[in-house]
Amino acid sequence: VYSPDYNITFMGLEKLHPFDAGKWGKVINFLKEEKLIGDDLIVQAREATDEDLLVVHTRRYLNKLKWSFVVATITEIPPVLFLPNFLVQRKVLKPLRTQTGGTIMAGKLAVDRGWAINVGGGFHHCSSDKGGGFCAYADITLAIKFLFERVPGVSKATIIDLDAHQGNGHERDFMNDHRVYIMDVYNRYIYPGDGFAKRAIKRKVELEWGTEDTEYLQKVHTHVEGALNELKPDIIVYNAGTDILDGDPLGGLAISPQGIVKRDEVVFKAARSRGIPILMVTSGGYQKRTARIIADSILNLHNLGLIDNQWS
């Protein structure tokens, strides 16, 4: 699931944030170069409407996004503060709303087809009434709530959050919701350090600075298996952040590109062996080389038969 509208380009302002705001389009271009996908295999994401967003977000929160300084704080791009809000809506928030719409659509596709990948999304620091950490809309919460409310037979979900940061947004949203099982593996020393939100995590794996492949993959494998054995959900939402990559300025972990590819394989194998639909979102990853790694991982999943056009 993708749309060219995912990419944030605005007079070079996007370069003031460590995030590569064009990474989503680069992933698609790499996959096209490798002949894995043509336009016929891409489901065009549609922008989430206000009505969609209100399934989770408060009206008060959505109104706050009409203030440029609020959006500047959430996206951590200070110059946004000085832009008129109509430009902020069009150039910053519309791409994020389109990625959010993509995650919601991918949830339904995953249930129908067995798997779906939204090349964007994964805004796991945003909850119903608060954004932060580049996350302005709670797409993971939205996708799950849409499935619970509108797709018969989906009543339990597992979130496997493997971004380097704690996923405090969906944790706050699902704090007392027993239908949602949250597993979160993150660097314990970095943003957001949200102690309250940690109470929602059923399987918490806190990593040390500089954790490397062997230890990381062993922990991911053990805990993914454990989580899915403890509860068999109707859908897995997999937050596949690439900010665990060695050298990431914000993640503080030391996983190799091959380690990331292997990690995604572990999660998809666990889902597929149990016949559980899986929705993957790409989340954080702040280096120019992450787009290539995401593309390599998707190619690997395809080569192993873990994603294909037939699986249903």
Image: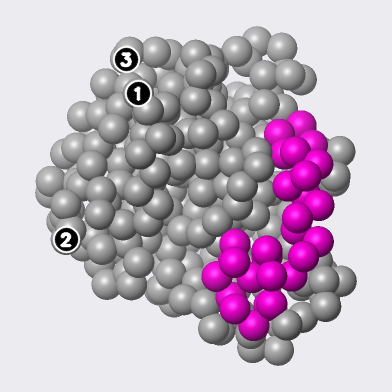
In which image quadrant can residue 288 be found?
Answer: bottom left
x 40%, y 52%: residue:
192
Q: Position of residue 38 (x, y in %)?
A: 68, 59
Disc 2 + disc 1, Cβ < 8 Å: no
Compute the Cα span from label 1 to label 3. 13 Å
Residue at label 3?
Answer: 229
Q: Which mark is residue 202?
A: 1
Q: Is residue 95 above or below residue 198?
A: below
Residue at label 2?
Answer: 210
121 lies left or right of 302: right
Q: Which residues are magenta?
A: 54-81
Which of disc 3 and disc 2 is earlier in sequence?
2
* Quarter of the picture holding the C terminus: top right
- At mark 1, the secondary structure is loop
x 51%, y 48%: residue:
125
Dot 1, how many residues are within 10 Å of its Cα: few (below 14), some (14-19), or many (20+)? some
x 26%, y 21%: residue:
226
Q: Amino acid at mark 3?
A: Asn
Q: Amino acid at mark 2?
A: Gly
Q: Is residue 179 above or below residue 87?
A: above
Magenta segment: does it hold 62? yes
- As rendered, which of 294 and 56 lies closer to the eye? 56
Compute the Cα span from label 2 to label 3. 29 Å
Dot 3, how many residues are within 10 Å of its Cα: few (below 14), some (14-19), or many (20+)? few
